[in-house]
Image: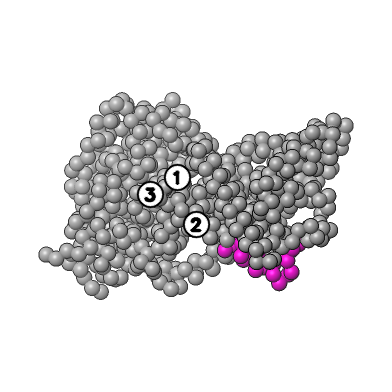
Amino acid sequence: MQTISLASLQPGEQATIRAINAEEGLFQRLTALGFRIGKRIELVRRARFAGPLHVRIGSTDIVLRETEARRIQIADTLRP
Amino acid sequence: MKRIALLGMPNTGKSTLFNRISGASARVGNWPGITVDLMSAKILLGGHIAELVDLPGIYDLHGFSDDELVVRHFLENNEIDLVILVLNTSQLDRQLSLGLQVRNLGLPTVLMLNMADEAKRSGISIDRESMSTQLGMPIALVSAKYGDGFKEALQIAAETLNKSSHPAPENLRAQLSSDDRIEHEMELIMKASVQMPLHLTDALTARIDRIVLHPWLGLPLFFAALYLLFQFIFTAGKPLQDGIAWILGYVRGGMLEPLLASAPPWLHGLLLDGIYNGVGTVAAFVPLIVLFFLVMTMVEDSGYLSRAAFLTDALMAKMGLDGRGFVMLLMGFGCNVPALMGTRVMRSRPLRLLTMLVIPFSLCSARLQVFVFMAAALFTPHQAPLVLFALYLMSFVATFITALLFKGQFRSNEPFLLELPPYRFPTPRQIALRGWHEVSHFLRRATKFIVAGVVLVWALTNFPSDVPPASPYTFAGMIGDALAPVLTPIGIDGKLAIALIFGFVAKEIVIGSLAVIYGLSGDPLMQLMAQKLDWVQGMSFMLFTLIYTPCLSTIATMRSESRSNAFMWFSIAWSLLLAWAASFVFYQGARALGF
């Protein structure tokens, strides 16, 4: 199964989280915000000029930078 | 006395619940094991007097953020009779993990599911019995904002408190370091007792976001909204400010002057010109501060600030700051003090300090008064608006230079992870309580500092007592002379130097002090200044005024918010250095070009 990072998702696309490559502190925060392996995640929009990503997991909307998004591996991308 | 800890994730309405339980009786206190202030209040619950402590909002008991450490240290070092855990009902699917972690601590706990009304509207239904059995703790459904279910919740809390026997803090330590199987158990409980619609999209929030966060319209809309906000604050705040100034003047002229007429001149001067005028300057700030926080509370609780941070983060990241820092800079255009306080939302200390370092360069309303006055005196009506615009640009340039220079020293390891909460509308009660709390806090700190500051400035300009006040022969005048080698290269003479010294207390005093120094006011003062100064000197003076330390209130806030004298002094020294350098480059450059 091919995995890519969350940062390569296009607005409107959904995918499943496959792995989170983060050190303890960041991992805890991501987990607490709902980033868990197996969860569906949607990229809602991106800010201009390589700005942060707006994603949705379940009922929670989250903003994160591309640096953090690259640590999250996804698969099963579903295009709208 | 019993001790109750209020615990919950950010954005759950925990503070609203705290305010509802405590009324407005909260105070700030220090606690063993932790270095930050926590809000606490004495309340009557189930026949006991209990102390309710509002712990910082956290996502996780085992995390490593500053807030999470604070909570852990608090639990490890203080005996706790009851934990009131607040979770957001609509987000139980991920917040329940904190519930399980707290249960594992073995402390008597009541779970309050907040925003139950909102959850019900979004189609979430909760089987309270089943959930309570599985979690092993009583559960209350509440709406902290509207007070629904509040009485019953307190009743349940009182019963739990009466039954409670708390484990010793040292036993908690072991518990706090172990965390397993929570994930699995969470799923079981969710399945058995909570029904959630699969795709809970708050349609209205999504629709507003589509416009507000639009790739091209987002930023222009943001600035338009901001402009309107400041317009509102100052249009509504100006008459109030003038009103207080009028009252203060009336009290002085009508009551205090006659009362102190027979007092010795030095006492008369100290009390009226020193303390009364100085504290009055702070008092005149109050309406603005009130309005600012009322508007701020509305904007903050609406969920829009997180959106503004999203829009500007790309630019700010290049300067070592983040999107929230930009929001604070804009708040600083009103007044630097609330903007500094606003940095409390930042979790990482280096990031917060860097943001606090740049906020004082925001051209606040007090400095604007000086610039409007000087520009009117030294420039034509056509040029004056351009001068003001140039100063606003300089304000940003100073911010950028500072952030770029120091971002290496304040490197933040904090990832930019921000929750976008659904849009909400705060209730009037919420706004009023929050506004009042911030204002009283501001006043308590500012008055103490201002009194000391104005007494010192008054003394400098009135001693030795056998020379005319504020003349070159007073201590202030001597300081002006002493500073001449530093200030002459930037075109600032001894008289302007005295005004700059006054400006340390508050920029409003600058114009007043110029009036005292030149012995004139209004139009004649402007004409005299136009004779004594050319525009290059005036501009250099304005640049210096823009960049150097804004006022004592800002310094005091800087110290109390950073809890570091060293940082406060660093900020003062850097702003003075940058102010001098900017004025020097401008003044010498303009002179070299023949102006």
Q: Is residue B187 left or right of residue B311?
A: left
Q: Which residue is mark 1?
A: B15
Q: Nearer the viewer, residue B16 or B74?
A: B74
Q: Residue at x 26, y 55 (%)?
A: A35
The image's mark for residue A22 is none
Q: Is residue B197 left or right of residue B496?
A: left
Q: Total marks drawn?
A: 3
Lower sequence index among marks 2 and 3: 2
Q: Classify residue B458 by image quadrant.
A: top right
Q: Is residue B265 visible?
A: yes
Secondary structure at badge 3 equals loop
The image's mark for residue B401 is 2
Q: Nearer the viewer, residue B297 or B190?
A: B297
Q: Is residue B12 visible?
A: no
Label 2 is placed on what type of residue?
Ile
Which chain letter goes with mark 1? B
* Residue B330 in picture, x, y percent from top left: 53, 58
Q: Are marks 3 and 1 on the same chain?
A: yes
The dominant secondary structure in magenta is: helix
Which chain letter goes with mark 3? B
Q: Is residue B482 magenta?
A: no
Which chain letter goes with mark 2? B
Label 1 is placed on what type of residue?
Ser
Q: Nearer the viewer, mark 1 or mark 2?
A: 2
Secondary structure at badge 1 equals helix
Range of residues picked out in magenta: B376-393
Q: Are marks 2 and 3 in contact (CB under 8 Å)?
A: no
Q: Distance from label 2 to label 3 (Cα)?
A: 18 Å
